């Protein structure tokens, strides 16, 4: 059941995540826009919740032979459709036993509710068959993690405010400003779009530049084609004006979608209101560049840990305004508690690495 939480006086409860998103959507509406999102939702299938033993050994878009995991994904898609949730596509992802289901774009509030339903359906179908589905961003070291790439656009009535027929890349100034706002505030909003300690095990550059890392962004940059960048401009197809959009690739599916959509929208709208210029795209492999080369191009790095992300967010007026004082203060406080609990643990890595020599 989805509902709005209100006070005894009938006023919206300020700590309700749906109310937070509604406030940000009203800001967009006051500017004449409706915010549409279409997420790519990745996850893993495992034998159980205490093991990372996979169910299949398929690869990216593998269609060679049916597998148990593929059957689970098929059941999930059919169940989502029965619940009235339109599925755009589904396929096997890069890592073993990793899958993706993409939902058809819609307004952000409907999509946030849908993401919550989606997570329940994926887990329930797996559980009914005796297995476990996980949205943990990086459950296995050395392979791709699971993200939630969010395709975004603004509509003015039935017109896509991001589409410009005359522009070489078919982007309006509104779209460019929105993208520039996302880039400028990316480091500030990362603790909300990637809100767990484990999230930052995914947002790391690969030691080996071939292939392009683990396809997770580590740097604040954009490109038209390059999949190592934080923000990507999907290819335009003639006659698909409504699909002109930008793709923000940092979030993972374990986030709170109401809060994540809120801060992404707030960053984009700030870019529109401030008319932020969009920097030049970076089509080169960022993982091959030295730190000095990236700095010369003005390319920043996303936070390397939850603690670093919290420190940046704590000083962000944009995130405080987007979330509201109550949610902002509670979020920062809770994330600091989580970090303190994590950093006080002694891991297997430390035992294996240090105990024999120290």
Image (spheres, grey):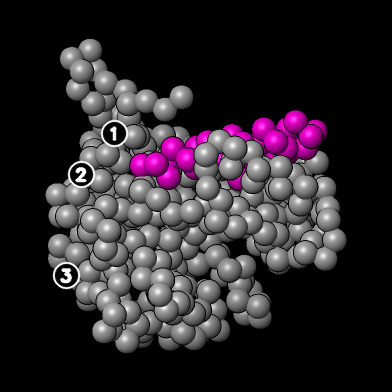
- Where disc 1 sits, the SS reads helix
What's the residue at 22%, 74% (across, down)? 173
Residue 263, horizontal then vertical, whole percent: 32, 50
Marker disc for residue 51 = none
Marker disc for residue 26 = 2
Q: Earlier in the sequence, mark 1 or mark 3?
A: 1
* Relative horizontal placement of residue 76, taking residue 172 as reference (left or right): right
Question: Which residue carries the number 3 mark?
Answer: 275
Q: Is 46 above or below relative to 124?
A: below
Mark 2 to mark 1: distance in Å? 10 Å
The quarter of the picture where residue 161 lies is bottom left
Asked whether the beta carbons under mark 2 and mark 1 sit within 8 Å of each other, the answer is no
Question: Which residue carries the number 1 mark?
Answer: 19
Q: Main secondary structure of the magenta part?
A: helix
Residue extending furthest toward the top: 8
Question: Label 2 crowding class (10 Å Cα cut-off): few <14, some 14-19, many 20+?
Answer: some
């Amino acid at each position: 059941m989805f509902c709005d939480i209100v006070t005894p006086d009938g006023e919206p409860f300020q700590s309700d995540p749906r109310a937070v998103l509604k406030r940000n959507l009203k800001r967009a509406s006051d500017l004449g826009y409706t915010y549409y999102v279409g997420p790519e939702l990745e996850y893993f299938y495992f034998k159980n919740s205490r093991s990372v033993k996979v169910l299949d050994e398929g690869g990216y878009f593998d269609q060679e032979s049916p597998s148990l995991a593929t059957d689970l994904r098929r059941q999930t898609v059919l169940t989502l459709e029965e619940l009235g949730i339109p599925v755009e596509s589904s396929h096997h992802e890069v890592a073993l036993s990793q899958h993706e289901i993409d939902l058809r774009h819609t307004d952000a509030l409907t999509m946030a509710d849908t993401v919550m339903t989606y997570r329940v359906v994926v887990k329930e179908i797996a559980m009914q068959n005796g297995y476990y589905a996980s949205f943990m961003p990086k459950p296995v070291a050395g392979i791709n993690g699971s993200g939630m790439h969010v395709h975004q656009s603004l509509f003015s009535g039935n017109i896509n405010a991001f589409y410009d027929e005359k522009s070489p890349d078919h982007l309006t100034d509104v779209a460019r400003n929105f993208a520039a706002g996302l880039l400028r505030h990316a480091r500030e909003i990362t603790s909300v779009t990637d809100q767990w300690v484990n999230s930052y095990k995914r947002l790391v550059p690969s030691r080996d530049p071939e292939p392009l890392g683990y396809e997770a962004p580590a740097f604040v940059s954009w490109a038209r084609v390059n999949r190592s960048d934080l923000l990507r401009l999907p290819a335009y197809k003639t006659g698909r004006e409504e699909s002109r959009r930008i793709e923000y690739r940092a979030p993972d599916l374990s986030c709170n979608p109401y809060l994540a959509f809120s801060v992404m929208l707030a960053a984009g709208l700030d870019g529109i209101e401030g008319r932020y210029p969009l920097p030049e795209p970076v089509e080169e492999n960022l993982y091959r560049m030295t730190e000095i080369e990236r700095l010369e191009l003005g390319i920043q790095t996303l936070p390397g840990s939850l603690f670093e992300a919290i420190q940046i967010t704590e000083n962000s007026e944009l995130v405080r305004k987007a979330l509201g004082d109550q949610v902002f203060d509670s979020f920062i406080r809770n994330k600091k508690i989580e970090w303190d609990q994590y950093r006080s643990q002694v891991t297997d890595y430390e035992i294996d690495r240090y105990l024999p020599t120290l």
